[in-house]
Image (cartoon, helix red, strand yellow):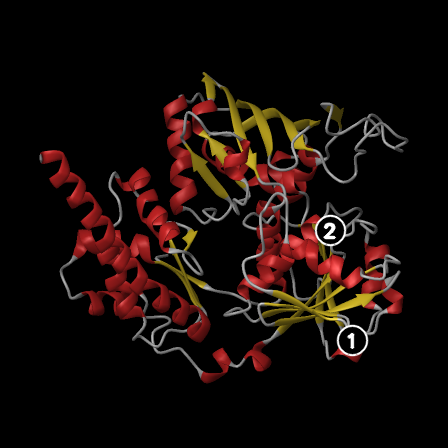
Amino acid sequence: MVSIINAQKQLSEWQEKEALLEQMIPLIGRLYRHNNVITSIYGRSVINQSVINLVKSHRFVRQTEGHELEPSDTLAILKVLDALNLGPCHIDIGKLAIAYREYQETPLSDWLRSQLSEVVNQYHQNNSDQTARRKDVVLYGFGRIGRFLARILVEKSGGSPLALRAIVVRKSGAANDLVKRASLLRRDSIHGSFEGTISIDEENNAIIANGSYIQVIYANSPAEVDYTKYGIENALVIDNTGVWRDEKGLSQHLQSKGVGKVLLTAPGKGDLKNIVYGINHNTIEESDRIVSAASCTTNAITPVLKVINDTFGIQHGHVETIHSYTNDQNLIDNFHKGDRRGRSAPLNMVVTETGAAKAVAKALPELNGKLTGNAIRVPTPNVSLAILNLDLLKPVSRDSLNEMLRERSLYSELNKQIDFVNSPDAVSSDFVGNRRAGIVDAKATIVSGHKAILYVWYDNEAGYSAQVMRLVQKMAGIEYRFFPA
């Protein structure tokens, strides 16, 4: 009888929780689409999430606070936010809920007005005028990174001023080229099905994804494209082909009518600024028209290396990247201009080079000359692992190093770049779709005196694409205030 009563109680509590979370969904959506307010719970976005995902976000808080977050607390906060006429910003409702639980000296509405005073009553009608605030974005190339960027841009189209206006690809020669492009966006073997609906306008060569009208332009080079013919002006072109990686080559985009700036999704050569968002993005000036987003590995390790160097100092170190295979490799043994990369990617571990260690110094000059690096391509399609073997200036314990990294992942300005996992059963597939630049695996950390070895996972597609999008917002002049500060 006791077990039956307990079972009924558990089910009843679950249903009550579901009911509260269902009330949150329209509030979250309205704040995003109407006010461009981006809500999260301890850094995890709650926009366009299911009830089950909201449950998981509330449960995640126990890893930090020792207890789950109560949906009644976050729902109360959302109801007040909905009435404050807020201007665009990021709000972590989870952190606000915990902070208010410890405070509670004034009514919640008064406390939130005080906490968010900079954006209260800052909503203006033009905030919701998509045409007036639109920032045109073009994807030049539509491969792995290009398609994931398209997913993010379409996902953000409900509230963000960024608008994916076109993709540029070479004509394949297939009669159903447009259908195949749309199909690759709709279905993905790694990241699953597209969240929403996709249709095509064959007469006008366009893909319509969740209401976003995306022009498909066929061209063999930037010189062939006039974007103004499609109503695209002052566009930010994201070149994800990797064909051109220096200023001279990428400058071809600037000769096309309708282009304002160019972002390369690969390490830049020569004097191009290689930017790791969160580390050196503030070095971008208005006059910079071509910028590189560096590599996925550089984005994954640089934030972690920065906080370690800031806290303990790095004398020197070695970075070994265990990287999933990419399109640059062959499925079966065949000619390849690069050493070893001609051998079958699904069948071999392939030792190869990486410029990530040297590239870190471009974003973090204090580590110049202190790092070496190498890479091993392995037979997995996505998610990679960087092993940081570091000699520190100060002795450190395993617990203190892990605790510092956990704290930085939650409360520092790098909480969008650094994630933290402390699971004894974590494996690479657990991190598919993770949009942090890198995820510290606490259980794998090894420390002995001045010596530290850290394991940093990263989704080399999703995590990197999220970093690219943060950089796109910076280049487009889109700035948000974050609350709590």
Check disc 2 and report its element: helix, strand or loop.
loop
Q: Quadrant of residue 133?
A: bottom right
Looking at the image, which residue sits at the far top? 448
Q: Nearer the viewer, mark 2 or mark 1?
A: 1
Whole-percent x and y of residue 109? 22, 69
Which numbered disc, 2 or 1, marks the residue that appears first in the sequence?
2
Left or right side of 295 for 314: left
Place of residue 157 in the rendered image (x, y in percent of width and height, measured from the top left): 55, 68
* Residue 70 can be seen in this image: no
Q: Residue at x 65, y 50 (%)?
A: 275
Name the quadrant of the N terminus. top left
Q: Are marks 2 and 1 in contact (CB under 8 Å)?
A: no
Is residue 433 something one can see in this rendering? yes
Indicate whether 124 appears above or below 142.
Answer: below
Query: Callout 1, which amino acid?
Result: Glu
Residue to which mark 2 is pinned = 143
- Asked which secondary structure carries label 1, the reply is loop
Considering the image in quadrants, where does the C terminus appear?
Answer: bottom left
- How many numbered dots are placed on residues in this image? 2
Where is residue 154 shown, x and y percent of the image?
A: 59, 64
Is 258 situated left or right of 447 in this image?
right
Crowd rating for badge 2 (residues with CA inside 10 Å; few <14, some 14–19, many 20+): some
User: From the viewer's perspective, is residue 292 above or below residue 107?
Assistant: above
* CA–CA distance in space, label 2 to label 1: 24 Å
- Residue 329 point in image, percent of width and height: 79, 34
Q: Badge 1 local density, few (<14 within 10 Å), some, or many (20+)? A: few
Residue 88 marker: none
Residue for badge 1 = 203
Name which quarter of the figure residue 359 lies in.
top right
Residue type at mark 2?
Gly
Q: Nearer the viewer, residue 450 or 137?
A: 137
